[in-house]
Image (spheres, helix red, strand yellow):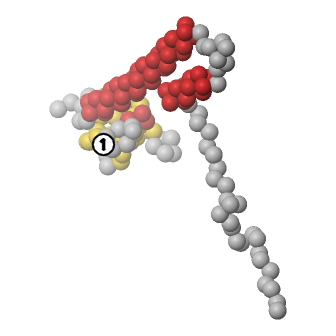
């Protein structure tokens, strides 16, 4: 009786595949709390953690959460300012550099808020707000 050889390169086993672990690049409140709980769980019963140290760490957690909230609010404020600026451009003469680096100018006719950076339509071309280099008011 002949037994066919098993090709291990093509037969992947459930136990041989490994998922890639992606390390977390930021510390959030969950990571901080996990570290605090681990520290409390592994402390020496004969010399428990200092109460002042625990209060200090809890204060650091609260400060970190508030800084995260402040950062989020700041990002939202900047996004709102960009939207207001883009809306104010409609009807004005704007200039920008095209993909080849040549200056182009035209009247802004509309604004799209679909992406993270508002896009202004100039002569049928959508131009990101941060690429606009000049604005002039057109005479009626």
Can you tell which quarter of the image residue 18 is in? bottom right
Horizontally, residue 51 falls left or right of residue 122, namely right
Residue 62 image position (x, y, % from top left)? 45, 17
The outermost residue toward the top is: 52
Residue 48 image position (x, y, % from top left)? 62, 14
Can you tell which quarter of the image residue 111 is in? top left
Question: Who is closer to the viewer here, 29 or 81?
Answer: 29
Horizontally, residue 44 falls left or right of residue 123, namely right
Q: Residue at x 77, y 75 (%)?
A: 7
Horizontally, residue 14 falls left or right of residue 137, namely right
Q: Is residue 14 above or below residue 96?
A: below
The quarter of the picture where the N terminus appears is bottom right
The quarter of the picture where the C terminus appears is top left
The residue tagged with tag 1: helix, strand or loop?
A: strand
Residue 33 image position (x, y, % from top left)? 52, 26
Horizontally, residue 5 falls left or right of residue 115, namely right
The outermost residue toward the front is: 46
Q: Is residue 118 above or below residue 68?
A: below
Q: Residue at x 51, y 45 (%)?
A: 100
Question: Who is closer to the viewer here, 73 or 14?
Answer: 14
Specify whether residue 29 is in view. yes
Neighbourhood count class around disc 1 (C-alpha, 10 Å): few under 14, some 14–19, many 20 upward: some
Question: Who is closer to the viewer here, 23 or 135?
Answer: 23
Q: Residue at x 31, y 32 (%)?
A: 83
Tell me the residue that label 1 is attached to. Answer: 112
Residue 138 image position (x, y, % from top left)? 24, 31
Q: Is residue 132 above or below residue 40?
A: below
């Amino acid at each position: 009786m002949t037994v066919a050889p098993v090709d291990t390169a093509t037969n992947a086993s459930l136990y041989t595949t490994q998922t890639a672990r992606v390390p977390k690049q930021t510390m959030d409140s969950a990571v901080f709390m996990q570290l605090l709980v681990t520290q409390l769980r592994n402390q020496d019963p004969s010399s428990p953690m200092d109460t002042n140290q625990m209060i200090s760490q809890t204060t650091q957690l609260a400060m970190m959460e508030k800084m995260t909230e402040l950062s989020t609010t700041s990002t939202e404020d900047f996004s709102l300012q960009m939207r207001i600026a883009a809306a104010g451009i409609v009807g004005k003469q704007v200039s920008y550099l095209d993909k080849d680096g040549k200056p182009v100018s035209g009247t802004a006719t509309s604004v799209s808020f679909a992406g993270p950076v508002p896009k202004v339509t100039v002569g049928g071309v959508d131009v990101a707000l941060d690429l606009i280099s000049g604005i002039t008011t057109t005479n009626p």
